[in-house]
Amino acid sequence: MKATREGYVEGLLEAGDQDSRVIVIDGDVSRSTGTIAFKEKFPDRFFNLGIAEQNMAEHCSGLALAGFIPFYSTYAVFATGRAWDQIRTSICNMNLNVRIGGAHGGTSVGPDGATHQALEDIAVTRVLPNMTVLVPADSNQTRQAVLASLSIDGPVYIRFGRNPVPLIYHRDRSVIPGRGHLLREGRHAAIVAAGAMVALALEASEMLSSEGIEVSVADMVSVKPLDYRLIKHLAGTSEFIVTAEDHQIAGGLFGAVSEYLSEHSPARILPVGINDRFGCSGTPEEVMQHCGITARVIAGRVRKALKSGYFH
């Protein structure tokens, strides 16, 4: 078990070694996000601009125009919410090479409560033209997402969490924009997940397998661009698809998958996610239970759909 924020920091340190243009801009939360490690290693390439997210975004746009590769790192809810206009107008409109590190995404920041739980960040970033949205599932994949961002032309949003999650990938398994990973293949249904929900999707698949229900599990680390070939494959080989995300159902992974399938390969799709509500205070596990985003809920969604016969 390891928090994805640890992978983010590992990736930043390696990126800093690989490219002297890499700069980290902090919003006075470097100890919480872990980016203080970059400050200690590269003190002349780390700048704390205080709790001023709009200024951070504008500062990064200037750095990018000057040829640098700035990583703008702070809590996801503030990184995307407080500076959305600046990200849209100054970063995305000019297609600048700014990387936004959305820390403590979803319910992983549990005890901090609803104000700090980013449950809308994927929706507000993926609608922006030129933006790439990566939602890694474990620490190793987060490290690879950071390194992959160095070769992406344009802005990139990388979402990561504070709560430890199981390791799924080998350290050197690459992340490619527009490419997901098929982790398990089954014939009854498919679960498409992102971020912390990938481990829960795999757990749900084990529960269902013990009952004779075999489901595919796909990790959609690249929410934008989406892996259309993988989604189409799952739609053609499964009776229905369940999406699983630590995010609002509206506008997130469910929205992205539904938008594609409705036009290109119509299929039944059911969501597991935050259903039009805010989070609450508690441990990440308690908040996920309260919000209905657990392995048992995912398995129950599949089980109920199959039992109803509606999808046959």
Image (spheres, rainbow, N blue to C red):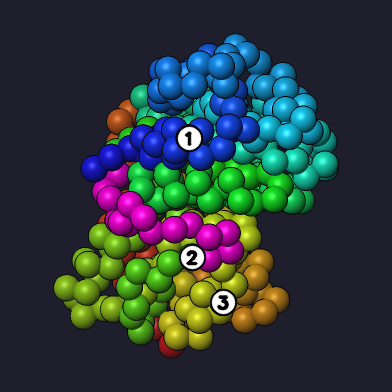
Q: Amino acid at mark 3?
A: Arg
CA neighbours of label 1 inside 10 A, class few (<14), some (14 to 19), many (20+): few
Left or right? Give the position of 240 relative to 44.
left
Q: Residues within 10 Å of mark 2 (few under 14, many from 20)?
A: many
Q: Are marks 1 and 2 in contact (CB under 8 Å)?
A: no
Say which mark, if any, is on residue 274. Answer: none
- The CA span between labels 1 and 2 is 27 Å
| x, y percent for residue 146 | 50, 43
Could you tell me if the residues under marks 2 and 3 are in contact, i.e. CB atoms within 8 Å?
A: no
| Residue to which mark 3 is pinned | 229
Q: Which residue in the structure is indicated by mark 1?
A: 17
Q: Mark 1: which amino acid?
A: Asp
x, y percentage for residue 306? 36, 78
Report the span colored magenta: 165-179
Calculate the distance from the C-alpha at mark 2 to the C-alpha at mark 3. 9 Å
* Main secondary structure of the magenta stretch: loop
Q: CA distance from mark 1 to mark 3?
A: 35 Å
Viewer-nearest residue: 297 or 10: 10
**Element at label 3:** helix
